[in-house]
Image (spheres, helix red, strand yellow):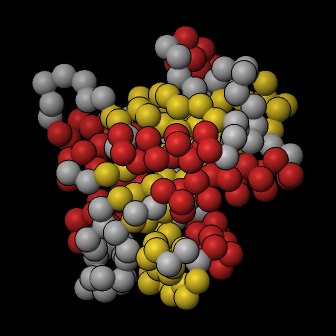
Amino acid sequence: MSTVHISANKGDFAETVLMPGDPHRSRFIAENYLSDAKLVNDLRGVRGYTGFYKGKRVSVMASGMGQPSMGIYSYELYSFFGVENIIRIGTCGAYPERIKPGDIIIALGACSDSAFAKRYDLPGTFSAIADFGLAKDAYEYCVSKGLRFEVGNVLSSDIFYSEVENAGKWAKMGLLGVEMESYALYCTAASLGKKALAICTVSDAIYDSKLILTPEQRETGLKTMIETALEIAR
Ligand code: HPA
C-alpha cells in the first residue's frame, strides 16, 4: 500500500517514528542505533527504516525541511500507516543568551508565521502543543542524564532567512528557539487525534551569528537528542 509520498506496506512502520529533517540522519540513526533495521521507504530519497532499539520496534524517517514537507509525511504516516507517535529530532536556533549551541530544547508549544492551520477554519488561534506524556518522558530522561536542556515554546517559521527585528519580537514573548517544522507536526497530530513531540538540538544562536556548533558539540548534542527520542519511544 503506497501513498502519494511514501512507498511502503501497511505494518512496515512502528507505532513510533522518529523524524529528523535530513535523510542522511535517518540512515545514520538506523545504522548506528537500530538492530535489524530495514529500509521501508526510499521515495524521493526520504529514507524510512524500521528496526529495534533495546528490543523496542521503532521507525525513523526524514521529514524534509519546512512545514509543507513535515505536514505531508506526518499526515501520511498517521493516516495510512498506523503510526501513533511522531518524535521530531531536529536542530534550532536559540533566542535567549543563556541557551548555547549543543543544548536541547523540548518544544512544549510551537508558534508560527505559517498559514498551516488556516485549513482547519477555526474561529480563533490554534495553540499547537506537544503531547504531554511524551514531553514529560523527555523531560524526565533529560533530568536523569543531567543534560543541559529547556522546555518551552518555539517558533516554527516558514522563513529561514528572516528579519532580525521579527526575531526580537518572538524572543520577547519568551520563545526559546526557532526551527521550521514543529507547528505543522503538532497541528497534524491534533487534527488526527495522534501524539507528537519535537526535541531540538541548538545548532546556532540568533543573538550571536558567530556562535555555531563546533563539530564536537554537534556530535554530542545530536547524540543526546537521538538517545532521548529513542529512550522515550513507545
Ligand atoms: N532558523 C530556522 N531554522 C533553523 C535555524 C534557524 O536559525 N537553525 C536551525 N534550524
Q: Could one spot residue 219 in this view of the protein?
A: yes
The one nearer the camera, 33 or 155, is 33
Q: Position of residue 59 (x, y in %)?
A: 46, 72
Quarter of the C terminus within the rendering: bottom left
> Which residue is at a point 62% across and 59% down the rendered structure image?
227
Q: Position of residue 151 (x, y in %)?
A: 53, 31
Q: Could one spot residue 161 in this view of the protein?
A: no
Relative height, residue 185 to residue 160 (above, below): below
> Which residue is at a point 55% across and 11% down the rendered structure image?
172
Q: Position of residue 214 (x, y in %)?
A: 86, 46
**Residue located farthest toward the front when viewing the structure as drawn:** 144
> Which residue is at a point 51% across and 46% down the rendered structure image?
138
The one nearer the camera, 51 or 10, is 51
Whether residue 98 sits left or right of residue 228 in the image: it is: right
> Which residue is at a point 45% across and 61% down the rendered structure image?
233
Relative height, residue 159 to residue 123 (above, below): below
Relative height, residue 1 to residue 218 (above, below): below
Quarter of the N terminus within the rendering: bottom left
The one nearer the camera, 206 or 231, is 231
Q: Quadrant of residue 135?
A: top left
Whether residue 61 sits left or right of residue 176 in the image: it is: left
Whether residue 39 sits left or right of residue 194 in the image: it is: right
Q: Position of residue 103 (x, y in %)?
A: 70, 38
Q: Quadrant of residue 16?
A: bottom left
